[in-house]
Image (spheres, rainbow, N blue to C red):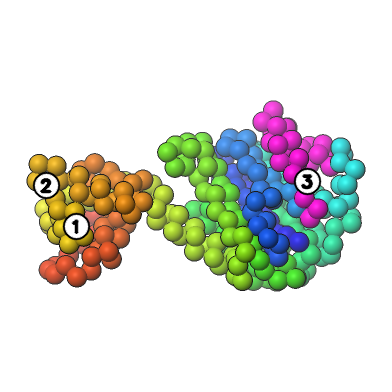
Amino acid sequence: MTFSLVARSADGRRHGVVVASRFLAAGALVPAAEAEVGALATQAHVNLAYRPQGLTLLRTGVAAADVVAGLVAADPDRDHRQLGVVATSGAGATWTGPSCHPWAGGQAGDGWAAQGNILAGPQVIDAMRDAWLGGVALPFPDRLVAALHAGDRAGGDRRGRQSAGLLVVERGGGYDSSDVLVDLRVDDHPDPVTELGRLLAVHTLLFGRPDPATLLDLTGAVAAEVGALLATLGHPVDPARPEEALFSWAGLENLEERLVPGRIDPIVLDHLRRAAPHVPGPRPATDPLTADN
């Protein structure tokens, strides 16, 4: 009923699972991941016990293939299960029980494993594999979703579409320094993979960390424009505390993760411009090499 990919980033700092299915809220059941430990997906006839048991084995340094072997060996219903696992190093591993509904199967390689059942055919897994391997230039969460898109375009679940989910972990990489970098679900939607991609874009806007190379000094023309924009939105700037209005507005917009004292993220500035587009006058470039700093 499901196709999924479990993977590790090239630097080993991130682990993630992406999944889609013609099944309600697959993202609530399939994925499990722990920062600096590994990730796994349990599907077909889901065994929720695989999640804590698998992470416990990974935490003790057991290789992905041995985690799969140990979990299915102890499971009397293993013939109906499907499982994918990645550890902190080495190849991923996948299992497809012989009683899973066709088409069912999986593939694995260094730091990844893709699997699916009730699929349109083996081309779904091939497409996910190729997209994953070819997506090295993408940010890790986007790379996972791109692989899921490829599987969906190749036919995905042969019964249709309903849900999708994405879970990515990194030590201290998430909101308020949590280990959950991304945790998004589309539980019931006619095009869940596309909707998951939209949610990831919103997540990146709100919770992405600013790129130090692109930050603009909050002085000169940049400061003047920011002050004018904030004033039109009901946040006049106090010259004695010039950042207070910006931080107040950004907090209401859920952009606090992108705030840097004395500087402004061009993404925050663009969002501010869209919120108050009627402010007249020239606007400084948001290219840090050409901005009036």
Label 1, label 3: how many angstroms apart (C-alpha)? 53 Å
Residue 186: quarter of image:
bottom right
The residue to which callout 2 is attached is 238
User: Which residue in the structure is indicated by mark 3?
Assistant: 47
Name of the residue lying farthest toward the front:
234
Q: CA distance from mark 1 to mark 2?
A: 12 Å
Instruction: Please tell me which residue is depicted at 71% across the width and 65% down the height of the picture.
Output: 22
Task: Give the amino acid at mark 3.
Answer: Asn
Which residue is at 47% across, 40% downward?
173
Q: Main secondary structure of the magenta part?
A: helix
Gap in angstroms between the C-alphas marked 3 and 2: 58 Å
Does the CB distance between marks 1 and 2 fall below 8 Å? no
Q: Farthest residue toward the left?
A: 239
- Per the image, the residue denoted by label 1 is 234
Estimate the x, y position of residue 164 in percent, counting from the top left: 62, 60
Badge 1 local density, few (<14 within 10 Å), some, or many (20+)? Answer: few
Q: Please name the amino acid that badge 2 sits on.
A: Asp
Say which label, 1 or 3, has the lower sequence index.
Answer: 3
Question: What span is in magenta?
Answer: 44-72
**From the viewer's perspective, is the residue at label 1 or at label 3 nearer?**
1
Instruction: Specify which label sits upstream in the sequence, 3 or 2.
Output: 3
> Residue at the spot x=67%, y=56% of the render?
26
Q: Nearer the viewer, residue 111 or 165?
A: 165
Report the front residue among 63 and 77.
77
Give the percent coordinates (x, y) of residue 75: 86, 41
Look at the numbered disc 3 and give the secondary structure of its residue. loop
Residue at 61%, 38% in the rendered image = 34
Question: Residue 101's quadrant in the figure?
Answer: bottom right
In the shown orientation, is residue 210 left or right of residue 87?
A: left
Q: Residues within 10 Å of mark 3 (few under 14, many from 20)?
A: many
The local crowd at label 2, few if under 14, some if 14 to 19, many if 20 or more residues have their Cα within 10 Å, is: few
